[in-house]
Every structure is written in C-alpha cells, then in structure tokens.
Amino acid sequence: MRPGIVLGLFMVGWIGAGALLRADDKPTTSVFGFTMKSLAGEDVNLAQYQGKVVMVVNTASKCGFTPQYKDLEALYEKYKDKGFVILGFPANNFGKQEPGTDAQIAEFCKDNYSVSFPMFSKISVLEPDKAAIYKYLTTQPQEKTKESGEVKWNFEKFLIGKDGKLVSRWRSPITPMSNDVVQTIETELAK
C-alpha cells in the first residue's frame, strides 16, 4: 500500500474517533478549534470563547424566523456578563433567505435588531460546501438527547459548554427565550 493511502486511511479512522479537520487541515475536537471570518472580514479564533457557554445560530435576514434576532439579542444582553456569548452565522441555504453581502447583513442586523453579539461572514451549513464548523456541529451527539444530523432550516441553535462540546440543540421553531433554552443556558453557566 502506498504511503498516501495509509495516511488517508489513518486520518479517516482518526476523524471517525471524534476529531474533524478544519479548513487548514488541522484536527479539532471542539468548537474552540476553529477560526472564522467576522462580517468585517477579520479572522476570529473561536478559542477566545473557551470557558464560556456559546450558542451558535445559523441566521438569515429574510426568513419567517428572522424576528428571533430580537430574542437572541435579549438573551445575549441578559447573560453576556455571566460568561455567555452568541455567535451568528448567516447562511443562504434555505429558500435563498440570506442573499446579502456581509456588509448588507451587518447593516440589516444593526438597523433592525441592534445586534451586538458577534456575527460572522456568510457560510454554508449544508453540503456540498458546508463550513467545517457545521460539519463538526452536525456530527456531534448532544449531551441531552444524543441526537445529531443536518440543519433543517434557518435559526437552529446549538449550545456549546465551556469545554467546547455540544450540550444541546434546538430546531428553528424553538425560540431563544423558551424555558428549555434559558434553563439549559443557566445550568451550563452554573457549572
């Protein structure tokens, strides 16, 4: 067997054991192993959020769930000083409901919902060009339900514990201020 094939098989086995290759081909076993582009085009190393409870949300400006930005901002304001952060990732995968540029998305979020939590450059949350962070998130079983799988629509919410592991996930219809979401956040913050 040629060395490249052996290495490839080794990497497939290693990735299957819980690691995922980032865009730069380095393995990660946590959300904190990724570096993403902000809406302003700057690299943001997610390791800066290690030790915080993090909610990752795929967003869209022209979706029926877009008003969830209001609750997301309220949730962020309520818990940000206690070690909580929301990371918004605009995506145009569902119904082409995020057609804008990064600059247009930033303006929309500021003007319509006063979004102050970190927002990132538009990505894809589905194959064939799914962003590495979403490859990681959709293959990790949740602590609460042991469920995993593809994102179904805009405004799915992934809650990450202080250790960078997926704790819980809520589909789009579950609002950010729902009892389950708030209680899960508070439980994680108390750890």
Image: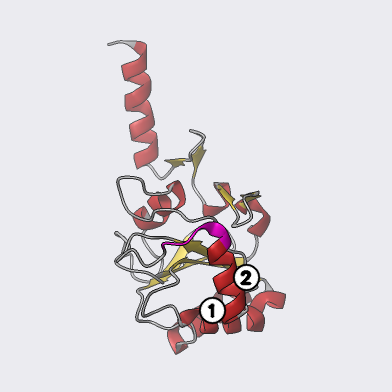
Q: Is residue 2 above or below residue 113?
A: above
Tag 2 secondary structure: loop
Q: Is residue 159 above or below residue 187?
A: above
Give the distance between the C-alpha atoms of the residues marked 1 and 2, in whole angstroms: 9 Å
Nearest to the observer: residue 143 or residue 88: 88
Q: Which residue is mark 2?
A: 117
Q: Looking at this view, name the residue that lies furthest to the top.
A: 2
**Residue 1 in picture, x, y percent from top left:** 27, 11
Tag 1 secondary structure: helix
Tag 1 and tag 2, C-beta contact below 8 Å? yes
Q: Reading the chain from its start, which is encountered first: label 1 or label 2? A: 1
Q: Which residue is mark 1?
A: 72
Q: Is residue 96 above or below residue 188?
A: above
Q: Quadrant of residue 141?
A: bottom left
Residue type beneath disc 2: Phe
**Which color scheme does this rendered protein use?**
secondary structure
Magenta residues, as a range? 99-103
Residue type beneath disc 1: Leu
Residue 46 left/right relative to 19: right
**Residue 110 in picture, x, y percent from top left:** 62, 74
Residue positioned 41% across, 54% down in the render: 134
Nearest to the observer: residue 104 or residue 53: 104
Q: Is residue 62 magenta?
A: no
Residue positioned 65% across, 73% down in the render: 116
Nearest to the observer: residue 161 or residue 116: 116
